[in-house]
Amino acid sequence: MKRSLALLFVLAAACTTNNFYNNGPQADAARGSADAHRDAAGDPDARGADDASPPGDVDARPHAADAATPDAMTTADAKPTPDAMIAPDAPPLSGDTTSCGKPLPTTAPVTIQFTGGVYDGTSGTGVAGATVAVYARNGTSPIASATTDAQGAYDFTVATGGKPIDGYVRVTSTGHVAADMYPAVPFVADTEWGIPVVDKTTLLSVQGQVLQDPAKALFVAQVDDCQQQALAGATLALTPSGAATISYPDEQHQGLYLTSTSTSGVAIANNVTPGDVLVDGVAGATSLRGQVITANVGELVLVLVSP
C-alpha cells in the first residue's frame, strides 16, 4: 500500500493542467532539452509554461502495438510526416459542450505545439525513446507524433485545420504500459505536459480502497477549478459504474481516504469496466464537465476533469 500511495502522489503531482513534468527529478533537464530544440530550430512561436492551455475530452482506441521500436530512438524534435500534419475533421464531442459556464471554443490556431517530458512514475527519471502521439477521438492512427530525447523531452507541432482537436495524448515506451492522457476540454492552444509511465507490476499497485482486478481497467483523475487549481470537495461518477470504486486519497494522511477530493484534487478509480466510460461529477453545487474516456485493461489512464 505504501508503494501504491507513493506512486499515486507522483502521478497526482504530475497531473496539473499546464506543467505536468515540473515535479519529477528530471524536470529541469527535460524542460531545458525541449527549449534547446526550439531554440535550435529558431522557432519564433516557442512558448513557456505560462502559455500552456487546458486540453480536452477524448477517446482512446489504439493499443500497446503502438509501442516504440528501436527505430523510434530519435530526438524529441522528430517531425510528423506530411500526411500526419493534416488533422481530420473533428467528430461530435462525447462530453458536455460547455466548460466553466462558457461554450467550448469552435476555432483554434492552425498549429498547436506539444512540449514536455515523459518520466518514470516511480523514479521520476526521464524516459528516452518514448513515442508521444496525439490522436483524434476514435482515431486509429496518430495525427502527429515524436520520440523523446535522452532526457525524456519531446517537442512537436500538430496541424489543426483551424479547429479544436478533440483528442488525447498517448505515450508508449519499451518496458512500460501505454499511458493515455485525457484533457479536460479539447486542445485549442500550445500544451506543455509531463507524462508519467509505469510498468505492469506498478500499474496494478495503483489502488485506492480496494485491490485492483487485473481483468479490469483503472484511471487516475485530477480535478481542477476554472483557474486550473486543484479542486477540493469534488466527487466523480462513472457511467456505466459497474463494479468500479472511486477513492479520494487524503493528501495529509497516507493510507486514509475522504468522501471527496482533498486539496490535491486527486481521485482514483479501480476496477472500471473496460470500454467507453462517461466521467462526470460535482463539486458542491457546481457540475463537472462530463467526458467519455476509453478505459483499456493494462494501461495507465490519466484524466483531467474541470467544471
Image: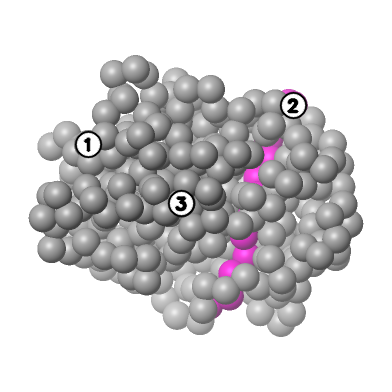
How many neighbours does mark 2 have within 10 angstroms: few (below 14), some (14-19), or many (20 or more)?
few
Horizontal side of residue 5 vs 67, given as left or right:
right
The answer to which image quadrant residue 211 occupies is: top right
- Residue 27 is marked as 3
Q: Quadrant of the N terminus?
A: top right
Q: Label 1 vs label 3: CA separation?
A: 20 Å
- Judge by depth and name the residue closer to the eye, 30 or 79: 30
- The relative height of residue 105 versus residue 77 in the rendered view (above or below) is below
Residue at 70%, 48% (x, y): give it: 8
Pointers 1 and 3 in contact (C-beta within 8 Å): no
- Residue 214 is marked as 2
Q: Quadrant of the C terminus?
A: bottom right
219 falls in the magenta region: yes
How many neighbours does mark 3 have within 10 angstroms: few (below 14), some (14-19), or many (20 or more)?
many
Pointers 2 and 1 in contact (C-beta within 8 Å): no
| Residue 292 percent location from the top left of the image | 55, 51
- Helix, strand or loop at mark 3: helix
> Bounds of the magenta span?
214-226
Horizontal side of residue 171 vs 291, given as left or right:
left
How many neighbours does mark 1 have within 10 angstroms: few (below 14), some (14-19), or many (20 or more)?
some
**Mark closer to the chain start, 1 or 3:** 3
- Residue 78 is marked as 1
Report the mark closest to the observer, 2 or 1: 1
| Residue 189 percent location from the top left of the image | 31, 64
Residue at 22%, 36% (x, y): give it: 78
Residue at 30%, 61% (x, y): give it: 190
**Mark closer to the chain start, 2 or 1:** 1
- Asked whether residue 244 is in view, the answer is no
**In this figure, which colouring scheme has been used for the structure?**
one colour
User: Hey, what amino acid is under mark 3?
Assistant: Ala
